[in-house]
Image (tube, grey):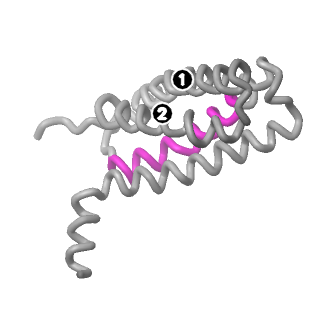
Amino acid sequence: MMEECKALFRKYREIIIYVIVGCMTTVVSWGACFVAELFLDADISWQNFLINSIGWVVGVTFSYPLNRQWVFRSKNPRVLKEFFGFAVSRLSTWVLDVAVMWVTVNLCHMNYWIAKIFISAVLVTITNYVFSKVFIFKKKEE
Protein backbone atom coordinates (compact mmCIF):
# COMPACT_ATOMS: atom_id res chain seq x y z
CA MET A 1 0.00 0.00 0.00
CA MET A 2 2.76 2.44 0.93
CA GLU A 3 4.65 1.72 -2.29
CA GLU A 4 1.52 2.43 -4.34
CA CYS A 5 1.11 5.76 -2.54
CA LYS A 6 4.74 6.65 -3.22
CA ALA A 7 4.34 5.70 -6.88
CA LEU A 8 1.22 7.86 -7.18
CA PHE A 9 3.02 10.76 -5.52
CA ARG A 10 5.98 10.43 -7.90
CA LYS A 11 3.63 10.30 -10.88
CA TYR A 12 1.57 13.32 -9.79
CA ARG A 13 4.22 15.14 -7.72
CA GLU A 14 4.10 18.37 -9.68
CA ILE A 15 0.33 18.71 -9.49
CA ILE A 16 0.22 17.73 -5.80
CA ILE A 17 2.90 20.26 -4.86
CA TYR A 18 1.24 22.86 -7.11
CA VAL A 19 -2.02 22.40 -5.21
CA ILE A 20 -0.22 22.69 -1.85
CA VAL A 21 1.65 25.84 -2.94
CA GLY A 22 -1.56 27.16 -4.46
CA CYS A 23 -3.41 26.65 -1.17
CA MET A 24 -0.64 28.45 0.71
CA THR A 25 -0.68 31.28 -1.84
CA THR A 26 -4.45 31.48 -1.65
CA VAL A 27 -4.37 31.82 2.14
CA VAL A 28 -1.76 34.57 1.91
CA SER A 29 -3.56 36.39 -0.94
CA TRP A 30 -6.99 36.12 0.64
CA GLY A 31 -5.51 37.20 3.97
CA ALA A 32 -4.30 40.35 2.24
CA CYS A 33 -7.79 40.78 0.70
CA PHE A 34 -9.39 40.28 4.10
CA VAL A 35 -7.17 42.93 5.69
CA ALA A 36 -7.82 45.30 2.77
CA GLU A 37 -11.56 44.69 3.09
CA LEU A 38 -11.39 45.93 6.69
CA PHE A 39 -10.56 49.37 5.27
CA LEU A 40 -12.34 49.23 1.89
CA ASP A 41 -15.87 48.38 0.71
CA ALA A 42 -16.05 45.52 -1.84
CA ASP A 43 -19.50 46.70 -2.94
CA ILE A 44 -17.93 49.84 -4.41
CA SER A 45 -16.43 48.93 -7.80
CA TRP A 46 -13.11 50.78 -7.54
CA GLN A 47 -12.57 49.52 -3.98
CA ASN A 48 -13.38 45.94 -5.06
CA PHE A 49 -10.71 46.45 -7.76
CA LEU A 50 -8.22 47.72 -5.18
CA ILE A 51 -8.89 44.84 -2.77
CA ASN A 52 -8.25 42.31 -5.54
CA SER A 53 -5.16 44.18 -6.70
CA ILE A 54 -3.62 44.10 -3.22
CA GLY A 55 -4.32 40.37 -2.97
CA TRP A 56 -2.77 39.82 -6.40
CA VAL A 57 0.49 41.65 -5.61
CA VAL A 58 0.91 39.81 -2.33
CA GLY A 59 0.05 36.46 -3.95
CA VAL A 60 2.47 36.81 -6.88
CA THR A 61 5.31 37.93 -4.62
CA PHE A 62 4.74 34.97 -2.33
CA SER A 63 4.05 32.42 -5.08
CA TYR A 64 6.91 32.86 -7.53
CA PRO A 65 9.80 31.48 -5.43
CA LEU A 66 7.72 28.52 -4.26
CA ASN A 67 6.60 27.63 -7.79
CA ARG A 68 10.12 28.10 -9.12
CA GLN A 69 11.81 25.90 -6.53
CA TRP A 70 9.24 23.40 -5.25
CA VAL A 71 6.73 22.88 -8.05
CA PHE A 72 8.56 23.21 -11.35
CA ARG A 73 12.15 22.88 -10.04
CA SER A 74 13.37 25.56 -12.39
CA LYS A 75 17.09 25.81 -13.06
CA ASN A 76 16.73 28.82 -15.36
CA PRO A 77 19.63 31.17 -14.55
CA ARG A 78 17.63 34.14 -15.86
CA VAL A 79 15.56 34.56 -12.72
CA LEU A 80 14.45 38.15 -13.40
CA LYS A 81 13.27 37.27 -16.90
CA GLU A 82 11.48 34.21 -15.55
CA PHE A 83 9.88 36.26 -12.76
CA PHE A 84 8.77 38.87 -15.30
CA GLY A 85 7.11 36.15 -17.39
CA PHE A 86 5.51 34.71 -14.26
CA ALA A 87 4.20 38.14 -13.23
CA VAL A 88 2.85 38.85 -16.73
CA SER A 89 1.03 35.50 -16.83
CA ARG A 90 -0.36 36.19 -13.37
CA LEU A 91 -1.35 39.67 -14.55
CA SER A 92 -3.56 38.10 -17.20
CA THR A 93 -5.25 35.90 -14.60
CA TRP A 94 -5.55 38.91 -12.30
CA VAL A 95 -7.57 40.56 -15.09
CA LEU A 96 -9.68 37.40 -15.20
CA ASP A 97 -10.13 37.55 -11.40
CA VAL A 98 -11.10 41.23 -11.45
CA ALA A 99 -13.57 40.67 -14.30
CA VAL A 100 -15.14 37.64 -12.64
CA MET A 101 -15.38 39.43 -9.29
CA TRP A 102 -16.90 42.54 -10.89
CA VAL A 103 -19.51 40.53 -12.77
CA THR A 104 -20.39 38.26 -9.85
CA VAL A 105 -20.31 40.83 -7.03
CA ASN A 106 -21.21 44.12 -8.67
CA LEU A 107 -23.55 42.95 -11.45
CA CYS A 108 -25.02 39.73 -10.05
CA HIS A 109 -24.82 40.85 -6.37
CA MET A 110 -23.25 37.59 -5.18
CA ASN A 111 -21.48 37.44 -1.85
CA TYR A 112 -17.84 38.48 -2.29
CA TRP A 113 -16.33 35.36 -0.71
CA ILE A 114 -18.70 32.91 -2.42
CA ALA A 115 -17.71 34.37 -5.79
CA LYS A 116 -14.03 34.49 -4.82
CA ILE A 117 -13.84 30.88 -3.61
CA PHE A 118 -16.17 28.97 -5.90
CA ILE A 119 -15.90 30.80 -9.20
CA SER A 120 -12.86 33.04 -9.49
CA ALA A 121 -10.38 30.86 -7.60
CA VAL A 122 -11.20 27.78 -9.67
CA LEU A 123 -10.83 29.57 -13.00
CA VAL A 124 -7.66 31.40 -11.95
CA THR A 125 -5.98 28.30 -10.49
CA ILE A 126 -6.47 26.22 -13.62
CA THR A 127 -5.34 29.03 -15.91
CA ASN A 128 -2.26 29.77 -13.76
CA TYR A 129 -1.15 26.13 -13.85
CA VAL A 130 -1.48 25.95 -17.62
CA PHE A 131 0.45 29.21 -18.12
CA SER A 132 3.20 28.10 -15.70
CA LYS A 133 3.54 24.64 -17.19
CA VAL A 134 3.37 25.63 -20.86
CA PHE A 135 5.05 29.06 -20.94
CA ILE A 136 6.98 30.00 -17.80
CA PHE A 137 8.64 26.88 -16.40
CA LYS A 138 8.62 24.70 -19.50
CA LYS A 139 11.47 22.24 -19.59
CA LYS A 140 13.85 22.44 -22.49
CA GLU A 141 14.27 19.26 -24.47
CA GLU A 142 17.40 17.45 -23.38
Percent position of residue 70, x then y: 40, 54
Question: Which amino acid type is marked by label 2?
Answer: Leu
Residue at horizontal 77 percent and vertical 43 percent from the top: 34
64 in relation to 86, above or below: below
Indicate the secondary structure of the residue bearing disc 1.
Answer: helix
Residue at horizontal 72 percent and vertical 42 percent from the top: 32
Q: State the residue position of label 2.
A: 123
Which of 140 and 130 lies nearest the eye of the viewer?
Answer: 130
Q: State the residue position of label 1.
A: 96
Circle 2 crowding by C-alpha within 10 Å: few under 14, some 14–19, many from 20? some
Question: Which amino acid type is marked by label 1?
Answer: Leu
Which of 69 and 21 lies nearest the eye of the viewer?
Answer: 21
Q: Which residues are magenta?
A: 52-73
Q: Quadrant of the C terminus?
A: top left
Instruction: Report how many numbered discs are placed on residues in the image.
Output: 2
From the viewer's perspective, tell me whether residue 48 is left or right of residue 137: right
Q: Main secondary structure of the magenta part?
A: helix
CB under 8 Å between discs 1 and 2: yes
65 in relation to 80, above or below: below
Cα separation, mark 1 vs mark 2, equals 8 Å
Q: Quadrant of residue 101?
A: top right
From the viewer's perspective, tell me whether residue 82 is left or right of residue 142: right
Percent position of residue 112, x then y: 72, 35
Which one is earlier in the sequence, the residue at label 1 or at label 2? 1
Labelled disc at residue 29: none
